[in-house]
Amino acid sequence: MSLSTAPAPAAPARPRGGLRGLLTGSGAGWLLGPPLVFLVLLLGLPILFLVIRTFTNSGLSTALDDQSFREAIPRTLLMAAIVTALTLVAGTIYALALGLAPRWGQVVLFGLLFMIFWTPLLVRTYGWILLQLPQGGIYWALHGIGLLDEPLEVYQKTIAAYPAMVHVMLPYAVLPIFQSLRQIEPTQLRAARVMGAKPLLTIRRVVLPQLRPGMLSAAVLVFIISLGFYVTPSLLGDPTSPTVAGLIGSTFNQPQADNVASAMSLLLLAVVVVVYALADRILGMSKQWEQERA
Amino acid sequence: MNDLRSASGRARTPILAIGALLGLFLLLPMLIVVPTSWTGTQLMEFPPHGFSLQWYEALTEDDQWTTPLWITVQTSLAASLIALVMGTLAGLGMRRLTRARTGALLRSIFIMPLAIPYIAYALGVYQLFLELPDVSDTLLPFILAQSLIAFPLVYVVVAGGLARVDPSLGRAAATMGARWPMIAWKIELPLIRGSIFAGWLFAFTVCFDEATLALFLAPIDKTTLPQELYGAASESISPELSAVSVVITLLAVLVLTCGTLLTNRLSARGRAA
């Protein structure tokens, strides 16, 4: 009855199926197959294991009842928000300065940005430790000019991680914002000037609105990275009031607590994925990131 | 940019001043690491006393740093090569997709590892490999985890390079009877040599610098360089650590500068071909 049992002898070879199908057609399926398997095995399976562990031996409720975890959530959100805001302001000004500087200034500012981007993260964090030690670099500099008498009490306080994190994130903000800056139509600036707009008005009403795509993309990226940032906050921040990532790290190392650590990880992951998915949905984030790195 | 300059008028000076201060802020950690590596005394002091290269000499006699450096080079190489193959395949495949909706969905999935918190991911990988006791004590889980993190970096750079390749070249070859492997191998890949190299270099750098996955996934007897630096920075701050930091930074900046120059040359040749 079914037609498929009797292949039509006169029909030409079907474009798909079998070895011949491997070569004909667009090849999209064959090319995308390996990366998709790779992602399922190395992204899907680990997340599945987190989900399974979260629900064994009431990991989720233990994590949610954990006082230190409950305190870590607002602390982490606050840290990520403050770091994002500071990075965004600093990154916008840096990008504007890149656009406004004379040729040699541009070279210097770009050189600094890339040198810092290329300096290993742990070297930079170590530099911040040296700066923030009670009698370290900042104390020495401020004491030298007579501004500070007491040893500095910053190292391993919650606030100590902020400048170091802004330092790490700054290139991620400057590059997309500068990208937006370069796309501003020069005639608009000329028009604003001809119409008599004052510089501040031009910046506020013509330049800044056009930087918005770059700024939004930078903000989402910096916020997401800050939420899960482990190394810098755990070296510089207050060990008695860890971030969510820091708490996951210390729970990870406790015996019999991997279900609790999994639950915390899954919640952190869920927040990040929701932010990412919303940003992707509303702002087309993944397309933008794809184009920026190009 | 000239119009931007004249449009900004008097606002230009304060912006440039704050920009210069931010540049100084970027330089700040290195401004302290470098002088402390020259310390002439045994202990870390501010300001550092004396000048000597004794801590650099100490490094050459000490395999505390050379062994982790070697392990890190090997793992980063392995992970970045896996990411390179997968990322390039993904880029070539996405170009051949005709359905826009599928493309958008796949792109979101491909870029997702950029957003994933490393610490949560490390825990998931750790538990996955607990089920495979034969390999859980090797470097394999760590290398595979790093390759996943590096995958989107290669993908975005390769996809960017492919976007500049004229699709009509492929169509012309297809009408002449070339099938897709031939088009990929003879037309697309040679034209994006620069992007492939840049993507690999980007992936290698990120793997080389990555500490969180190493801290939770690398076996105890095989510490990577970032792990060793993390341990040293949290336990014993010393002029020797400053010297290591300076050497590694110089190495990284040197390699990346050469790599960037090479990328530019390869891209220029790719366009000429």
Image (tube, helix red, strand yellow):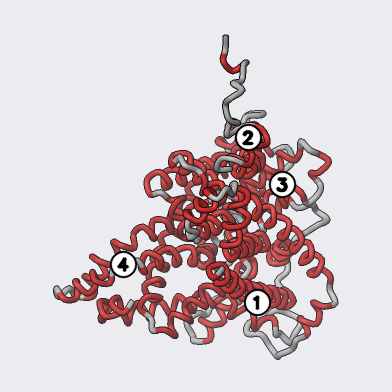
Chain of the residue on which disc 2 is drawn = A
Disc marking residue A184: 4
* Kind of residue indicated by mark 1: Leu
Percent x, y for residue A213?
36, 57
Q: Chain of mark 4?
A: A
Residue tagged 3: A253
Seen from the viewer's position, the closer of residues B18 and A62 is: B18
Tell me if label 3 and label 1 are in contact, CB under 8 Å. Answer: no
Identified at 68% across, 45% down, the residue is A252
| Numbered disc in front, either 2 or 3 | 2
The residue shown at (62%, 29%) is: A55
Number of residues whose C-alpha sits closer than 10 Å to that of mark 1, classed few (under 14), some (14–19) or many (20 or more): some
The quarter of the rendered structure image containing the N terminus of chain B is bottom left
User: Toward which corner of the image does residue B44 lie, by quadrant?
Assistant: bottom right
Name the amino acid, label 4.
Answer: Ile
Residue at numbered disc 1:
B254
Comparing marks 4 and 3, which lies closer to the viewer? Answer: 4
Residue A201 at x, y = what percent? 21, 70
Q: Which residue has dot 2 on it? A: A48
Chain ID at mark 3: A
Amino acid type for the residue under numbered disc 2:
Leu
Q: Mark 3 to mark 1: distance in Å? A: 37 Å
**Measuring 71% from the left and 60% from the top, which residue is drawn there?**
B76
| Labels 1 and 4 within one chain | no
Badge nearest the viewer, 1 or 2: 1
Q: Label 3 sits on what residue type? A: Asn
